[in-house]
Amino acid sequence: MVLHSKRPLFAPIIRTGAPLSVLATVAITAFLAACPTLCAAKPPAWKLVWRDEFDGASGPAVDSSKWNFDVGGKGWGNNELETYTNRAVNAHLERGLLVITALKESFTGPDGATRNYSSARLLTRNKFSQAYGRFEARIKIPYGQGIWPAFWLLGDNIGIAHWPNCGEIDIMENIGREPAIVHGTFHGPGYSGGSGISAAYALPNGRKFSDDFHTFALEWEPNVIRFYVDGILYKTRTPADLPAGTTWVFDHPFFIILNVAVGGGWPGNPDATTVFPQQMLVDYVRVYQRATLAKRASAVH
């Protein structure tokens, strides 16, 4: 496994001035008097309200105060081939990383479905959810035909409104046959599944996302969603992007999901070129709110 280092928390750059000569001080003072807003200290745009740095001891312990597991193998609405488990072999901590591992094995889950692959799907449902903010993760994704890693959000009213009325925001999805491309997509009533509102970001110069860690982020505010890769804004979405007659459903708390699926209608199935095991390495997940709204974070303990 490749050694890594944690990236610093998302924060604005603050510059401090050096000592000035008397003449320079007089000149700058006169200038600032004419433009007083330039000398005002700007508060941070975002304030950290939730995070998992995955810094626990190496072993099976995923923080159960932050994450639940989805388990089972009945396709998850996408004709997927894996059974999701809560076993350490499919999700564990190692040297400051969350490691999600997809294995090729015959496994029967608690729902009685037997599949030829296993993996893990972690979610913060009933642990943490939030409406609006910056959701960010630093991830090294796997690579291979039929492999489908994702970092995404679901509306926490899914039990009542059901999908897609609850809303879904895919911050990062990749299908293994496109190693240089990730997708940012949102789904709602009338624009779900293959009709989701999507955009793609491609690495230049033949690079693959599986070669290194990359930072995937979403900035979500009332009536706007912005998608980022490595700090680069590649798509902004608003209600104007919706199909006629449909509704924007991104105005309530959503929870976080991390998973690696195997197979399914979009990526297709693994073939002879696909190597197992496959691993997604997650350095951290961090959630921010606008500094003026940070006290409104919705957390369930």
Image (tube, helix red, strand yellow):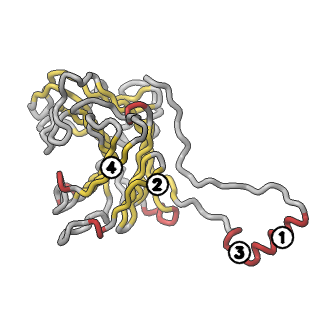
Q: Is residue 55 above or below residue 273?
A: below
Q: Earlier in the sequence, mark 1 or mark 3?
A: 1
Figure quadrant of residue 62: top left
- Please name the residue that numbered disc 4 is placed on: 200
Callout 2 touching callout 4 (CB < 8 Å): no
Q: Earlier in the sequence, mark 1 or mark 4?
A: 1
Callout 2 touching callout 3 (CB < 8 Å): no
Tag nearer the camera, 3 or 4 = 4
Q: Secondary structure at mark 3?
A: helix
Looking at this view, name the residue that lies furthest to the front: 205
| Few, some or many residues within 10 Å of mark 1 (<14, 14–19, 20+) | few
Q: Is residue 1 above or below residue 236?
A: above
Kindly identify the amino acid type of the residue bearing the numbered disc 4.
Answer: Ala
Tag nearer the camera, 2 or 1 = 1
Q: Is residue 106 left or right of residue 124?
A: left
| Few, some or many residues within 10 Å of mark 3 (<14, 14–19, 20+) | few
Residue 82, horizontal then vertical, whole percent: 18, 32
- Please name the residue that numbered disc 3 is placed on: 36
Identify the image quadrant of the N terminus: top left
Callout 1 touching callout 4 (CB < 8 Å): no
Q: Is residue 15 above or below residue 276?
A: below
- Work out how far the residue at label 1 is from the one at label 3, CA to CA, in angstroms: 14 Å
Query: 15 and 284: which one is in front?
Result: 15
- Please name the residue that numbered disc 1 is placed on: 27
Tag nearer the camera, 2 or 4 = 4
Kindly identify the amino acid type of the residue bearing the numbered disc 3.
Answer: Pro
- Work out how far the residue at label 2 is from the one at label 3, CA to CA, in angstroms: 29 Å
- Please name the residue that numbered disc 2 is placed on: 288
Q: Earlier in the sequence, mark 2 or mark 1?
A: 1
Q: Earlier in the sequence, mark 3 or mark 4?
A: 3
